[in-house]
Amino acid sequence: MKHLFRLSVIVAASAFALLAGCASGPQQETAGQYIDDTTITARVKTAIYQEPTLKSSEINVETFKGRVQLSGFVSTRASMERAGAVAKGVSGVTAVSNDLRLK
């Protein structure tokens, strides 16, 4: 899993290296911010995957400028709260929008 994570970060960084000079606005990210967000998303997904009480295949993670949005379905309110806590504990996360729903 570590190799897959590292490979995805390297691929994302390489793909967006040409866009490093792009400016950002309120609804846009620079290439550097995009790479940072891709890294944060991968870290949150990995942390959720490593949490034995969560079914990571049913939790979606999106990141924009350090703000993480969780969506998908969980079976208990405790799982919903745990997923939010795990996401908040990841380095680089500035805020978490927990939009998980109970099945």
Image (spheres, rainbow, N blue to C red):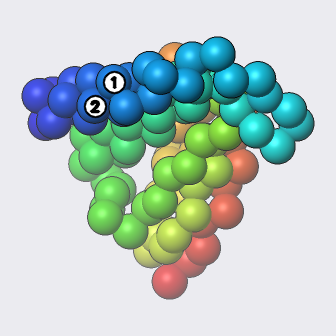
Q: In which quarter of the image is residue 84?
A: top right
The amino acid beneath tag 1 is Ser
Residue 34 is situated, as x and y percent measured from the top left of the image, at: 57, 31
Q: Quadrant of residue 48?
A: top left
The amino acid beneath tag 2 is Val
Q: Determine the CA span between mark 2 and mark 1.
A: 5 Å
Answer whether residue 51 is visible to the viewer in this image: no
Residue 26 drawn above or below residue 75: above
28 with respect to 87 (left or right): right
**Residue appearing at x 19%, y 29% in the figure:** 7
**Camera-side residue of 63 and 19:** 19
**Residue appearing at x 31%, y 38% in the figure:** 46
Looking at the image, the residue that sits furthest to the bottom is 103
Q: What label sits on residue 11 in the rendered view?
A: 2
Q: Name the residue under label 1.
A: 14
Q: What label sits on residue 66 in the rendered view?
A: none
Q: In the rendered structure, are the residues bearing label 2 and label 1 in contact, judged by CB atoms less than 8 Å apart?
A: yes
Quadrant of image for the N terminus = top left
Quick one: SS at disc 1?
helix
